[in-house]
Image (spheres, helix red, strand yellow):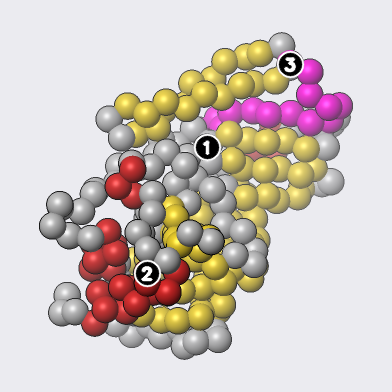
């Protein structure tokens, strides 16, 4: 039995609606909804080879820039650090709560536009941040955590990263609208349920990079 998950947006937040459909999946493969507080491993069956866990987390509200402010200026001003990175590693793990999959994503720094006080990632070094979702193997079973409203970072792809810093753990924190993926047409958000104002940073890749450099040099 397969679960079909629909996503709707109400007031800027994504809401998951789960319905059960009588669609036969390949033997050993299942799709389930995240059950808050229920450990993933406790839901694995002896016949499972692959399990997709659909996140029940709603998309956080994203504050849009005022009309007179560009998206690049807005994101750069709000972030503690801004980097151009190429993703080099993606390591999935069971979340601290045990009910989903998180990933530690590492990226090679191609350019550092702005950095938090006391933190430095020179060009060529790697920085690491955590995201919700990803894939982990446990006892021969592939467990994939899927967040319906965002595209998971891909190894080898290039991103503009707008991040904050957790002062208690000194770890980078990436907000919902904090990753923009390089494409032939410029940089586009990894959010799949984004407002039209957030979809693109408007401009070619070189133009956007110049805009970020300029924004990062302005007094904050």
The CA span between labels 1 and 2 is 27 Å
Residue at 23 percent of width and 49 percent of height: 64
Residue at the disc numbered 3: 23
Mark toward the viewer: 1 or 2: 2
The CA span between labels 3 and 2 is 45 Å
| Left or right of residue 30: residue 172 | left
Residue at 54 percent of width and 67 percent of height: 158
Q: Main SS of the magenta segment?
A: loop
Q: Earlier in the sequence, mark 1 or mark 2?
A: 1
Residue at 34 percent of width and 49 percent of height: 198
Closer to the camera, 128 or 204? 204
Say what secondary structure mark 1 lies in: loop
Closer to the camera, 113 or 47? 113
Q: Earlier in the sequence, mark 3 or mark 2?
A: 3
| Left or right of residue 204: residue 135 | right
Instruction: Choose top left, top right, bottom left or bottom right for residue 171.
Output: bottom left
* Residue 184, above or below 14: below
The CA span between labels 3 and 1 is 20 Å
Q: Earlier in the sequence, mark 3 or mark 1?
A: 3
Mark toward the viewer: 3 or 2: 2
Which label is found at residue 148? 1
Q: Residue 46: x and y, percent?
A: 84, 31
| Left or right of residue 53: residue 150 | left
* Residue 142, above or below 175: above
Q: Residues within 10 Å of mark 2 (few under 14, many from 20)?
A: some
Residue at 57 percent of width and 15 percent of height: 19
Residue at the disc numbered 2: 208
Instruction: Choose top left, top right, bottom left or bottom right for residue 180.
Output: bottom left
Say what secondary structure mark 3 lies in: loop
Q: Is residue 78 visible?
A: no
Say what secondary structure mark 2 lies in: helix
Q: Over which residues does the magenta segment extend? A: 23-39
């Amino acid at each position: 039995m397969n679960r079909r998950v629909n996503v709707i947006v109400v007031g800027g937040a994504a809401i998951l609606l789960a319905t059960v459909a009588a669609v036969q999946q390949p033997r050993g493969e299942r799709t389930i909804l995240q059950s808050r507080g229920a450990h993933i491993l406790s839901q694995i069956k002896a016949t499972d080879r692959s399990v997709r866990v659909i996140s029940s987390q709603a998309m956080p509200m994203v504050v849009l820039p005022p009309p007179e402010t560009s998206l690049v200026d807005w994101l750069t001003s709000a972030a503690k650090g801004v980097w151009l990175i190429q993703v080099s590693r993606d390591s999935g793990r069971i979340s601290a709560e045990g009910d989903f999959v998180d990933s530690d994503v590492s990226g090679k720094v191609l350019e550092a536009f702005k950095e938090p006080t006391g933190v430095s990632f020179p060009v060529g070094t790697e920085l690491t941040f955590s995201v919700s979702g990803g894939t982990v193997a446990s006892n021969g079973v592939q467990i994939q955590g899927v967040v319906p409203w965002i595209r998971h970072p891909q190894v080898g792809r290039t991103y503009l990263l707008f991040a904050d810093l957790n002062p208690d753990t000194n770890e980078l924190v990436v907000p919902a609208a904090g990753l923009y993926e390089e494409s032939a047409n410029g940089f586009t958000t990894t959010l799949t349920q984004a407002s039209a104002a957030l979809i693109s940073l408007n401009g070619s890749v070189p133009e956007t990079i110049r805009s970020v450099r300029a924004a990062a040099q302005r007094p904050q």
